[in-house]
Amino acid sequence: MNKIGLIISREYITRVRKRSFLLLTVIAPFFFAFLCLLPVWWATNSQKQVEVLVLYDDYFFINKFTDNAHVHFSYHTGDDLVRLQKEAIRGETCDAVLTIPSNNQQIYANLYSAKEIPMLLVPEIESQLDKILFDRILQDTFQINPDKFETIKNQSRSHLVSLLTDKSGNVLSRFSQLSRYIGLFLGFIIYLIIVMFSSQVLRGVLEEKNGRVAEVLLSTVKPLELMMGKIVGIALIGLTQFGLWALLTFSIVQGMNTLLPGLWHATDMDTHREVLQEFYHAILGISFSDILLSFVFYFLFGYLIYAALFAAIGAAADHETDTISFVLPVTFPLLLTLVFLFLIKDGQYSLILWWLSIIPFTSPVAMLARLPLGVPSWELWLSGTLLVLFFFFCVWLSAKIYRREMLMFGKKNR
């Protein structure tokens, strides 16, 4: 047992001191936050207003388009729309030119630009054109005032909000689907971590085997001790890295909560600010204690199972290229589970998902995805018990392969 502790200590200290570990641990949370914040900031602050010149031969369209923060319309009429469009583009008096020929039934319009235009500009203009045509038909064909029609439509509009309640009927959150998305996120994260750190075990075994380091180590320790020391050492690395990620991410989220009101106030989007703040508080209102404990449990045993299998693959292979044919069948159940999680909607295939959360090969991902939605205690105990028993089986099987292949390395070529 003391020898296993020494191997664990060696694996842990050696990998913690690597620059790659320190860089990935510190930079990754900021990188993820940057990816989340950049699209929001870009969409709300950096998009300049596009100047669109509307050319038409029908006076009905004058001042019919609505300006907003992203687009401003100006108008010009004439007989030769093609000539006016070319002159406007050539003179760079606008960013785009919208030409609308006269037609009583449908609007066939073209949007010309000499440079790239925002992706959302076309659906924005098309939506406004649809409304303009609809108002024209209301007025000309049915003699209905468009403003009165809009008033009636607004008064008869319904708004359905999905509310999550406890057993007493108290409202917990308006984001009733939040738990499902958190489950998908946790399932994806645990899949990523298991595969990433199990691959480190495989590469470590291959390096020691091909570098003849394993032969020196096996002269003083048993193969099972060497395998378990390497697996547990890398597992501790994973837990350390995940804990630091969680701590840094929580700090970043707290910083976002401080900056969020000023950010959305600056963009004059009070409604969106209110919804985002409610969404943020809904996340904080979720009890993550059980989820965190289950995450650690399923990560540990899920990782230990796949790391043991990867260690056996690394011991059986002579080169890293030889491991591809073995790794894919081993990781396929996890990948298949991840695909099922994203395909399943609104409780469909619940029996399939139940079995995936019970089978040890797939339960680390499937059970974590189900957990935020509520899982009966007996299912958790059943899934956890089978996972632990399967871990001992995988360690026994992998140890036999590991011992045989590491001790017999090179003999088959003699």
Image (cartoon, rainbow, N blue to C red):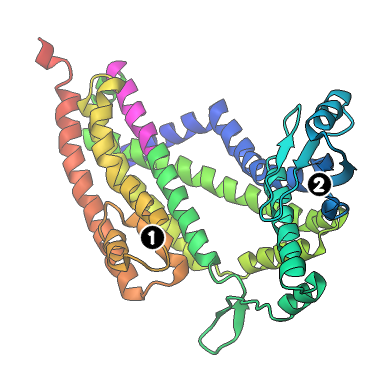
> Looking at the rendering, in which quadrant would you find the N terminus?
top left
Q: What SS does tag 2 mark?
A: loop
The quadrant in which residue 384 appears is bottom left
Figure check: 275 above or below 171: above
Q: What residue span does the magenta drawing correspond to?
A: 197-212
Query: Outermost residue, top direction?
Result: 414
Name the residue that disc number 1 marks.
344
Apparent side of residue 288 relative to residue 54 in the rendered image (left or right): left
- The amino acid beneath tag 2 is His
Q: Examine the rendering and report whether any part of residue 346 can be seen.
A: yes
Please state which of the two labelled residues, at mark 2 or mark 1, is closer to the viewer.
Answer: 2
Q: Residue at x 75, y 64 (%)?
A: 135
Near-viewer residue (163 or 120): 120
Residue 338 place in picture, x, y as percent: 38, 50
Please rate how many residues cluster around mark 2, counting C-alpha atoms within 10 Å: few if below 14, some from 14 to 19, many from 20: some
Asked if residue 278 is positioned above or below residue 163 in the image, the reply reads above
Which residue does the image show at 48% across and 31% down from the upper left? 15
Q: Residue at x 71, y 64 (%)?
A: 137
Instruction: Say if the magenta span includes residue 362.
Output: no
Residue 236: horizontal and vertical position, in percent?
44, 43
Residue 322: x %, y % from top left:
25, 23
- As helix, strand or loop, the secondary structure at mark 1 comes to loop
Please name whichever residue, 99 or 275, is drawn nearer the observer in this view of the structure.
99
Residue type indicated by callout 1:
Ile
Residue at 41% x, 64% y is 370
Real-space Cα separation, disc 2 to disc 1, in angstroms: 37 Å
In the picture, the disc for residue 70 is 2
